[in-house]
Amino acid sequence: MGDWHQKKRPLCLEKRFEFKTYEETRDFLDRLGDYSESSQRFPDISFGRTYVNITIRPESEDDAMDLTESDYYFANKIDGLFD
């Protein structure tokens, strides 16, 4: 699945998206914001002029947290916003 990296501690998926211009970065962030609002799922985001770092934590908040199909689906949808 793309270039998403799964970390064990804390359990999450991470990916860095890189852009040529600030305008491309802003456009991606706008699409990501719209998608997050419509899906009611909000990843951790950090960004600079030409990059965006995204961290997806497990959607489930129970004690046996694990990444689920829903988490990977969300990551795939974010990949689609980049293409």
Image: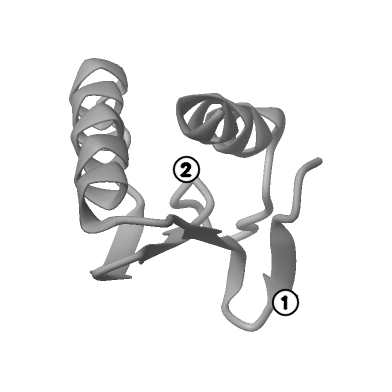
Q: Quadrant of the N terminus?
A: top right
Q: Residue at x 58, y 38 (%)?
A: 75
Element marked by disc 2 = loop
**63 is higher (above) or lower (below) than 82:** below
- Mark 2 closeness class: few <14, some 14–19, many ≥20 residues within 10 Å: some
**Residue that label 2 marks:** 59
Judged left or right of residue 3, residue 60 is left
**Residue that label 1 marks:** 8
Say which quarter of the image contains residue 16. Answer: bottom right
> At label 2, which amino acid type do we have?
Glu
Q: Residue at x 60, y 28 (%)?
A: 70
Q: Position of residue 7 (x, y in %)?
A: 70, 74
Q: Nearer the viewer, residue 46 or 36?
A: 46
Q: Do the residues under discs 2 and 1 have CB atoms within 8 angstroms?
A: no
Q: Residue at x 34, y 65 (%)?
A: 50
Element marked by disc 1 = strand
Q: Quadrant of the C terminus?
A: top right
* Labels 2 and 1: the sequence-earlier one: 1
Q: Position of residue 32 (x, y in %)?
A: 30, 35
Q: Furthest residue to the top?
A: 38
Judged left or right of residue 11, residue 78 is left
Q: From mark 2 to mark 1, how far is it between C-alphas? A: 15 Å
Q: Residue at x 23, y 16 (%)?
A: 38
Judged left or right of residue 80, residue 8 is right
> At label 1, which amino acid type do we have?
Lys
Q: Nearer the viewer, residue 69 or 48?
A: 48
Judged left or right of residue 57, residue 11 is right
**9 is higher (above) or lower (below) than 47:** below
Say which quarter of the image contains residue 76. Answer: top right
Q: Nearer the viewer, residue 11 or 29?
A: 29
